[in-house]
Amino acid sequence: MANIIKKTDFRFLDEKGFSFLELMVVVVILGILATYIAPRFMGRTEDAKAVKAKVDIAALETSFKLYKLDNSNYPTTEQGILALIEKPSTEPVPMNWKEKGYLAKAKIPKDPWGREYLYLSPGIHDDYDIISYGADGAPGGDGKNRDINSWELE
């Protein structure tokens, strides 16, 4: 005889999914959680950018010190950070410039906000100054707009 399919073989057809009310409760709970948790992580992005700028500046400082060890002076403001990856042709021309440059990836990093770091040599505060003007790209500021400077690194 032919197999007869019983209604109980398709139990999933009788089962219902979540009701609209249950879905709305879940959405409300997720909304409440997002309201309290999201702000805690939102400020962390700017903190992370400031930390990255400090790390970049510290790495650039190390590269400039190696440059000075090889060439007896720091690159001038005119030669700039580019002197770490390309041999300067302007005075003072480095005599012992390292063939592969002084940055590991042979690429000058931009600050976390996508702008060039400012390099001054001789600097106002030290032999050289390296500056990121923060999120707003303008000198001064507080919070996320605060400048990050080589002479203020800890």
Image (spheres, helix red, strand yellow):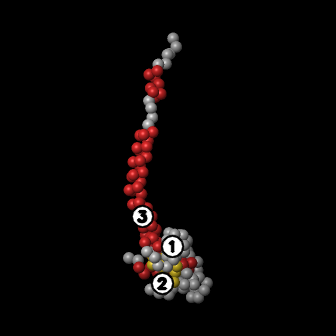
Query: On the image, numbered disc 3 is attached to which residue?
Result: 44
Of circles 1 and 2, the one toward us is 1
Distance between mark 3 and mark 2 Cα atoms: 30 Å
- Dot 1 or dot 3: first in sequence order is 3
> Which residue is at a point 44% across and 41% down the rendered structure image?
23
Left or right, 107 with reference to 59 = right
Distance between mark 1 and mark 2 Cα atoms: 23 Å
Q: Label 3's element?
A: helix
Of circles 1 and 3, the one toward us is 1
Rendering coords of residue 108 (x, y %)? 54, 73
Rendering coords of residue 112 (x, y %)? 50, 69
Amino acid type assigned to the residue bearing label 3 in the image: Arg
Whether tag 1 and tag 3 are in contact, CB under 8 A, the answer is no
Query: On the image, numbered disc 1 is attached to which residue?
Result: 136
Left or right, 37 with reference to 3 = left
Q: Which mark is residue 128?
A: 2
- Dot 3 or dot 2: first in sequence order is 3
In front of the other: 18 or 100: 18
- Rendered position, 107 above or below 11: below
Rendering coords of residue 114 (x, y %)? 54, 70
**Is disc 3 surrounded by few (<14), some (14 to 19) or many (20+) residues within 10 Å?**
few
